[in-house]
Image (tube, grey):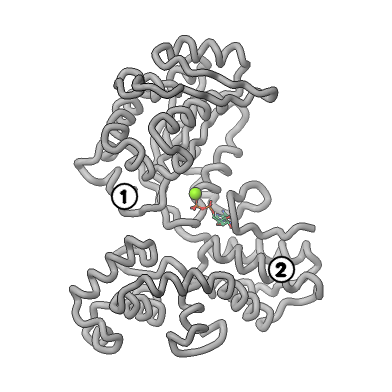
């Protein structure tokens, strides 16, 4: 059998763990026509959650998914957006062509329909998109189509912060102007740049101020991951005791991507031998995963200033919730002063190495302490501790 633990790409169906509350919240928002701001650090599972929530919608409820990081220009975005909306309705080719003619009369896109009815759209190069009415026409397509079909539509705009680079304020404002009039469409704006996502819906000057409800995705509870891990090993003819599964989760701070990475490696290594997994197996798998990332960490380390390195090590050693601003911490780690700490944390935050949750700082990357220990930068050797 294939390794049941996936650490790259989207996971859905049998490979998807938990998130029942979040899926229910998304479904409620879709039905109420509310918009959602979904955010979390990278690789917590935003994309997987959106796809799973869509897949679990009953037949007849339509959805469209757009990954903004795939667009390289406003034109590219418009093409992706229109294709996703047309695809999401699963409509007959004739109907799709009629919509394009009637609803996109200024834009006049070229449609390429393949044999299974998937749509690709080319709007052609030209200054037309610079006209607000033309862009507005594209942004209004979801509502027009939903109206025509008499259905509700859920539209996800994943990697939403990319919008700022694509079209700046203008595009964001055009979106706001269009979307706020839509009655049949619910938008999910998803992104990992926590600060920017928070500002989008919470800052008064933002065009999206309070336009939807925030949904901050946390880690996956250990109580849900442990049985999933146990089952994956069982299917491979192995046994992963529950306490060891819990230890696996703990060693990477319950970070969904790293739990899956470590489980994947452990499963592969132990597969040939079968039988029961031991703590030594886990330690070896962890060391091996740290090894994969060694080049990345070394480069990262070189890039940081001395002061940022000290801050990062202090966080790694003290763990989440430690007060880096306390006088004894500053003295012990050579952090100079509270304002130096503040500046270093901000820089580390911009690099997405450190994040702030409920007023406390923590490392975004739970593997870093293991690497730092293996590299002799931190006291204590071995996988755990
Ligand atoms: N609900 C989940 N169940 C199991 N694994 C998950 C789940 N969510 C995330 N993961 C793990 O994290 C990885 C990254 O998920 P992804 O959805 O791409 O995150 P994001 O969009 O937040 O960056 C997945 O490949 C998977 O290994
Ligand atoms: Mg994603």
**Nearer the observer, 33 or 139:** 139
Report which residue position mark 1 lands on. 196
* Label 2 crowd (10 A; few <14 / some 14-19 / many >=20): many
Residue 56 pos. (x, y %): 60, 39
Among the 4 quarters of the image, the one containing residue 316: bottom left
**Nearer the observer, 374 or 261:** 374
Among the 4 quarters of the image, the one containing residue 363: bottom left
Q: Which residue is painted at 64% across and 57% down in the image?
A: 6
Element assignment for label 1: helix
Residue 54 pos. (x, y %): 56, 38
Q: Is residue 3 left or right of residue 162?
A: right
Q: Is residue 343 left or right of residue 94?
A: left
Kindly identify which numbered label has been placed on residue 74.
none
Q: Which quarter of the image is occupied by the N terminus? A: bottom right
Mark 2 and mark 1: span between their CA atoms? 38 Å
Q: Which residue is painted at 42% across and 34% down in the image?
A: 187
Q: Which residue is painted at 62% across and 16% down in the image?
A: 92
**Residue 342 visible in the current orientation:** yes
Report if the CB atoms under discs 2 and 1 are less than 8 Å apart: no
Give whichever of discs 2 and 1 has the lower sequence position. Answer: 1
* Label 1 crowd (10 A; few <14 / some 14-19 / many >=20): some
**Residue 183 visible in the current orientation:** no
Q: Which residue is painted at 71% across and 72% down in the image?
A: 240
Report which residue position mark 2 lands on. 267
Q: Is residue 235 left or right of residue 174?
A: right
């Amino acid at each position: 059998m294939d390794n049941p633990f996936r650490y790259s790409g989207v996971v859905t169906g049998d490979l998807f763990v938990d998130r029942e509350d979040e899926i229910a919240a998304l479904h409620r928002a879709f039905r109420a026509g509310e918009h959602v701001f979904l955010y979390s650090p990278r690789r917590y599972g935003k994309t997987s959650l959106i796809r799973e929530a869509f897949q679990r919608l009953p037949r007849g409820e339509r959805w469209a998914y757009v990954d903004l990081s795939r667009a390289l220009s406003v034109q590219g975005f418009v093409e992706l957006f229109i294709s996703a909306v047309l695809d999401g309705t699963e409509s007959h080719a004739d109907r799709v062509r009629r919509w394009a003619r009637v609803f996109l009369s200024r834009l006049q896109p070229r449609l390429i329909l393949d044999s299974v009815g998937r749509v690709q759209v080319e709007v052609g190069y030209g200054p037309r998109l610079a006209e607000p009415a033309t862009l507005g026409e594209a942004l209004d397509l979801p509502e027009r189509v939903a109206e025509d079909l008499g259905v509700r539509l859920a539209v996800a705009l994943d990697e939403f912060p990319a919008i700022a680079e694509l079209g700046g304020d203008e595009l964001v404002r055009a979106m706001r102007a269009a979307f706020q009039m839509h009655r049949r469409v619910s938008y999910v704006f998803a992104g990992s740049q926590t600060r920017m996502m928070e500002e989008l819906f919470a800052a008064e000057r933002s065009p999206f101020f309070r336009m939807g409800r925030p949904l901050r995705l946390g880690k996956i509870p250990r109580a849900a991951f442990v049985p999933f891990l146990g089952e994956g090993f069982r299917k491979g003819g192995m046994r992963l005791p529950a306490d060891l599964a819990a230890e696996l989760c703990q060693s990477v701070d319950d970070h969904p991507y790293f739990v899956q990475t470590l489980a994947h490696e452990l499963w592969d290594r132990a597969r040939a031998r079968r039988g029961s997994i031991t703590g030594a197996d886990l330690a070896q798998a962890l060391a091996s995963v740290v090894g994969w990332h060694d080049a990345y960490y070394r480069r990262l380390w070189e890039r940081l200033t001395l002061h940022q390195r000290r801050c990062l090590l202090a966080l790694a050693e003290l763990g989440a919730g430690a007060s880096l601003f306390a006088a004894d911490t500053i003295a012990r780690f050579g952090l100079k002063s509270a304002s130096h700490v503040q500046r270093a944390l901000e820089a580390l935050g911009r690099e997405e190495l450190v994040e702030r949750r409920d007023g406390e700082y923590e490392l975004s990357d739970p593997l870093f302490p293991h690497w730092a220990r293996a590299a002799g930068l931190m006291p204590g050797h071995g996988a755990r501790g």
